[in-house]
Amino acid sequence: MFSDAGGVFSACLSGMQEIERGSRTRRTADRDGRFRIFLERAFYAGCGICGVGISHGFHHKDRGGNRSTESESVSIADFPALNAGLNTLSTIFIAAGWWFISREQKRRHITCMVAALVTSSAFLTCYLIYHFNVGSVRFTEQGWSRAVYFPLLISHLILAIVVVPMIVMTVVPALRSRFDRHRKFGKWTMPVWLYVSITGVLVYLMLYIWFPSTAAPVR
């Protein structure tokens, strides 16, 4: 009698555990689905920011306020918006890669990190082209914004220099299948890289959108 009751109790307990596991699996699947939707929307938002520079090229005006005859080319003045878009995409790819590897989804992690390398490299190329042609753009806004902008800019510049060898030291072991070293460096590289990408967008917003400079660029 007691053995029969014990068997029924064990069966009920097993059933409850199966239900709980199933519920947990569904919740995880729901979270994964919502995160994939968020990534997809964020990706398109980043693409939209990238397109700002291009769209400005089609509506470029000359100094007299008239439409430029070179309306089919992208002006060098559009590069800051393009750079911000590339930084936004890098941020999305880095965050997604971090999220995927935390769930042992290695193939998706690799895809996102390769995409982050491509967008970051494209950003660096466009950044150098812009400043080679335009020079340095000064932050002219006064007040509290300076106390925010300059620490943000300085930390961004310092870590942008530091993160380049960090990325190399993280990627090379992965290419050589030295995943122990890849993980060792990656846990430091990824948050620094993410910070640089995010602050790059914030610097653009402060310098060109929220508090646009009123001074001519300095060569």
Image (cartoon, rainbow, N blue to C red):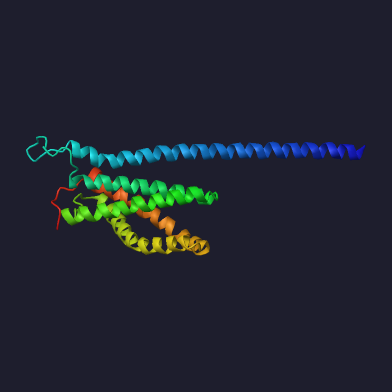
Closer to the camera, 33 or 69? 69
Q: Position of residue 184 (x, y in %)?
A: 50, 63
Q: Is 69 left, or right, of 43 in this rendering?
A: left
Query: In this figure, what is the number of numbered marks?
Result: 0
Up-down relation of residue 161 to residue 27 (above or below): below
At a point 64% along the width and 36% down the height, the residue shown is: 23
Up-down relation of residue 219 to residue 73 (above or below): below
Q: Position of residue 47 (x, y in %)?
A: 33, 40
Q: Residue furthest front?
A: 176
Q: Is 95 left, or right, of 103 in this rendering?
A: left
At a point 56% along the width and 38% down the height, the residue shown is: 29
Q: Is residue 135 visible?
A: no
Q: Is residue 77 visible?
A: yes
At a point 32% along the width and 54% down the height, the residue shown is: 121
At a point 76% along the width and 39% down the height, the residue shown is: 14
The C terminus sits in image quarter: bottom left
Q: Position of residue 162 (x, y in %)?
A: 35, 63
Up-down relation of residue 131 to residue 45 (above or below): below
Q: Is 170 left, or right, of 150 in this rendering?
A: right
Q: Position of residue 43 (x, y in %)?
A: 38, 41
Q: Residue furthest right?
A: 1
The N terminus sits in image quarter: top right
